[in-house]
Amino acid sequence: MTDDLKKQIESKQGSQGFIKVTDNPVQDLNDQQKVALNRKANALFNEGRIDMAERIFITTGYSDGLTRVGDVYAKKNEWLKALRMYLLAHNKRKSGPLIEKMSGLVSMMLKDEE
């Protein structure tokens, strides 16, 4: 990515950035509580209640669960939501290609503006 493109993106994204993420699971949970919550979230995920499972996985910081939620969003072509989950899960194997894809799209859009 060229410096000019980076500057253009930064000038258009605003102060909040494109994706708002938090990387801090709740620290007050002990291991038993995390296990119980992750089991509940897995059950919710399997029932198709992805939004509820997502909230719990974010709370516990369970990377496998976050990745699976990201996969659901990716299948629905909800790329920003998928990327957010992959970034929270620290899953570079899945976030990297999405970042490349999105940066290519943004690059094309910026070139069209010129």
Image (cartoon, rainbow, N blue to C red):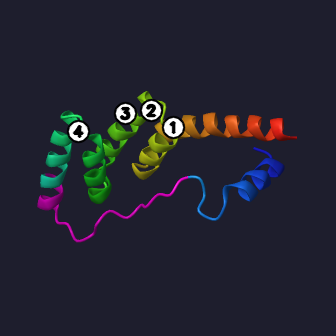
Circle 3 crowding by C-alpha within 10 Å: few under 14, some 14–19, many from 20: some
Quadrant in which the N terminus is drawn: top right
Q: 4 or 30: which is nearer to us?
A: 4
Q: Which residue is mark 4?
A: 45
- The segment highlighted magenta reads 19-35
Between the residue at mark 3 and the residue at mark 4, the CA separation in whole angstroms equals 10 Å
Q: Which residue is mark 3?
A: 72
Q: Measured from the top left, where is residue 50 in percent x and y?
A: 28, 41
Circle 2 crowding by C-alpha within 10 Å: few under 14, some 14–19, many from 20: some
Q: Which residue is mark 2?
A: 74
Which element type, helix, strand or loop, lies under badge 3? helix
- Counting residues from the start of the chain, the first of labels 1 and 3 encountered is 3
Labels 1 and 4 touching (C-beta < 8 A): no
Which element type, helix, strand or loop, lies under badge 4? helix
Is 1 drawn above or below residue 88 in the view shown?
above
Q: Which residue is mark 1?
A: 79
Q: Residue at x 53, y 53 (%)?
A: 19
